[in-house]
Structure formats: structure tokens, C-alpha cells
Image: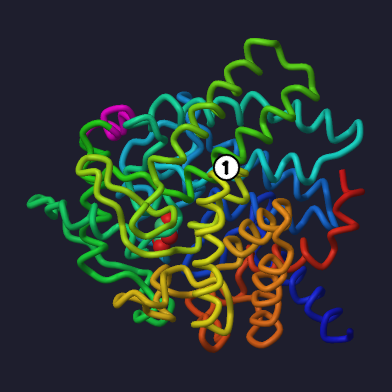
Amino acid sequence: MSQKLSLQQTAINTLNLNDRGGFTIPTAGLYPYQWNWDSAFVALGIATYDMDRAWREITTLIEGQWPDGMIPSIIFRDDNPDYFPGPSRWGKTHGAIPSTGVSQPPVLATVVRQITQGSKGIARRAEVFDAIFAWHKWFHDARTASGIVATVHPWETGRDNCPEWNIGLDLMEVAPDLPPYTRMDNKHVNPHHRPTQEQYDKYLTIVHFGDGIGWDQRRLTNEGPFLMADPNIHFVLLRADKDLLAMAEEIGEPVETCEQIRAWIAKGEAATDYIWNEELGAFSARDIRTGKFSDGFSNCSALCFYADTGTKEQRARVLAHLQRVENKVSYMLPSWDPDAPDFEPQRYWCGPMWPQMNYMTALGLEEQSEPEMARTIRDALNNAIEKSGFWECFDPLTGEGCVGANFSWTAAVWLSWQNATKLSGAA
Ligand code: DGY
């Protein structure tokens, strides 16, 4: 009990430490700016003790929105030498604040719906509705390819170096005119926890291409060097569209707006089959140009429950994978298949367990009447935090913390789980 109480205080202290006055950085040094989906999870945690500050996290994130509706993955309010690639490398982007030229998994609508209730909550939902609607519209218009919302950069998926992307990255050449650069990430943390140099060259090649076309998002999707379907973006957006529709109905948005969101949901439901890998018996990433699937079970493969999509048979096969993986690791849910040859338990998205993924996966399983697996996934993260502290991610074999320490979304997920009843009165 006392350890729990002190972890509660350490979690709040971690979020205070990373507070930059209205927005929260993920962790000092490695990630010194406001990151998109990090901020959404941070708001979820802060809402358990300071709703006004949680709301500020959301509105500062929206300040970075582009005129075309995109909310970028990183908002650069200054030029911090700790981070590469910073604003100068991304070039002339389109928002009022310098930013990256790609987005991130849109968890915001789901978080807004979760933390706002009552009459004040309705007013808050109405305050951000148009911005979130415009962002979802951007995904459906500018990022759709082959009927599914696609991704143009592993950074956009939030799962940077997951081996899922190798089939897309292997098709790419590094730009011959790629300007030289010095990485900073591997100076802040153990370089063996980070992506490889070859991967960075490809990440920077996509940035170079985007800058070269003036960040025209439709061209980036159609002509860019990388185009894959990501189960994370697909399931997160489908769930967020459903939450957006519920909010639209509650706040009395016009019928055409609700109809538009219903059409996105129907499109999303139809696209779920596009990422069903029959041979694997699970949802996996797919290269849109070649049609090729990645061949491993990742920690977004089971987000079909969170999005409430997929057939009964597909869900049963996904559950069977979860049971297989559970027998291989001590801390569910690894980001990459522990039976895959390229599983690396401490290297970023090649194996570690990630707090925000455990949060979404457990929530979905619980909502869809799979409480046992949901509990396993929640307990695993709580146990790793109790053992090691608020790390960015954790070795799924040992529970050891990996990559960044004092990490905001880990503190936020902990707070949200420990204070679930307080949250419901938070708005
Ligand atoms: C990084 O710099 O590692 C980030 O994940 C990019 O968003």
C-alpha cells in the first residue's frame, strides 16, 4: 500500500518534472518537445488530479494543427540541440508552429471522451470537436490508399523500428543526396536500445522526400518512398471515429457531420480485412504497393478488441496468439513476436513491452469480455513499474526498464489505472 502511495506521488512528480508550461515532454534529453500521442495519454493521467491542466495538454497539442487538419507527430516550440531531426531538418512545414510533416496514431478523440463528463465535459467536447473532426478527415482524405488509412513513415505509426516495417523499408533506397547528419538519440540512452543507422538513413530519406515536395500530404501518400498499412493507426482511428461519433451525437452536431463519421466507420470496418494475415492468423502490417504482409504478431495485433472490429473467428485466433506469447514472456505484451528471429527484448519496438499499448489492449479486451487476458496485460505493466519505475518501455523477459527514464506516458497510464474511479468525476 505504501509503495503504491509513493508510486502515485512519483508518477505525479514525473509529470511535473516533464511539464514545460502547458504541455508535457515525454522525457528530458531524448524527447524534448511535445509529442502527439504522448500528450493524449498524458492528459489521461493528469485528468486524475488536475482536470484544467489535463485540458491544457490537449489544447496545446491542437495549437500545432495544420490548415489541412493534420496534427503533427512533434510540435517544435524551440530548436533544441538535444534532438535530431529538429525543425530545420523537417524544413518548411505548414502549421502555425514548426513541426514534423507526419502525424501519429489519433488517440485524442478516445481520451477526450474518456476524461470529460457532465455539463462542463460536454462544453469541453464541443470546444475541440471541430479540430479533431478535421484531423480525422485529413487521415481519411490525405492518407487513404487501397481503401485503408495508410502510413508514409514508421515514425507516423509510433512504432518506429518494429520489424513490421522491414518489408517496406527494404524496398527503399537511401537518397543519394541525403544531407549528412549526426544522431542525438543514441547519445542520451543505450544505443543498443535504439534503431540502427541503416534505419535512420531511411527515416531521413522519407523526411528529405517530404521536404522536397513542400510537404504536400496527398503526394507524400501517393508518391513517397514508403507506403504501408499499420494495424495500430487503423484500429486506433476506427476506435477514435466511434468515440467521435458518440460525442457528435451528444453535443448535437449536424446530421451531415454524423453521417460523414458513420461513413468513415463503415470504411474502417471494411478495411479491417485488408490487414488480416490469414497465414499468420492475426492482424499485421501490410505493404500497400506489393500487398505483402509482415509475418509476426505485434503489440497492436490485438487492438481489434479496442476498435471492436474483426470477426468472431479472427478474434479467437488473435486470442490464441496472445496465449502463445504469454507462455514465452514474463511481462506481456511484447512489441514483437518472441518466436520471430528478429525479436530483441531491449531494442525499442523489436520486443519491449510498451505502457500505452498495454493500456489500449487491456481496455479493449476488458470491454469485449476477455477479462482474464486484460488482467494479465495490466498486471504485467504494473509489476514492471513496481519493479523498475517509470521507464519508456520494459524488457518483457525481465521487467527491466528500457530506453528513456522518468517517462510521462508510463506515469500517466499508472495514474489512470490506479485512480479509475476518480477519473469518472474529473470533468
Ligand atoms: C524518435 O525520435 O525516436 C521518435 O520516435 C520520432 O517520433
In which quadrant is the N terminus drawn? bottom right
Residue sticking out furthest to the left: 176
> What stretch of residues is rendered in magenta?
213-221
Query: For numbered disc 1, what is the local secondary structure?
Result: loop
- At 26% from the left and 29% from the top, the residue drawn is 219
The x, y position of residue 411, in whole percent, is: 69, 68
- At 75% from the left and 39% from the top, the residue drawn is 113
The x, y position of residue 361, in whole percent, is: 61, 59
- At 36% from the left and 64% from the top, the residue drawn is 296
- Residue 31 lies left or right of residue 356; in this view the side is left
Residue type at numbered disc 1: Thr
The x, y position of residue 11, in whole percent, is: 74, 71
- Residue 197 lies left or right of residue 192; in this view the side is left
Q: Which residue is mark 1?
A: 309
Q: In this orientation, does residue 404 appear?
A: no
On the image, which quarter does residue 273 sit in? top left
Q: Is residue 239 magenta?
A: no
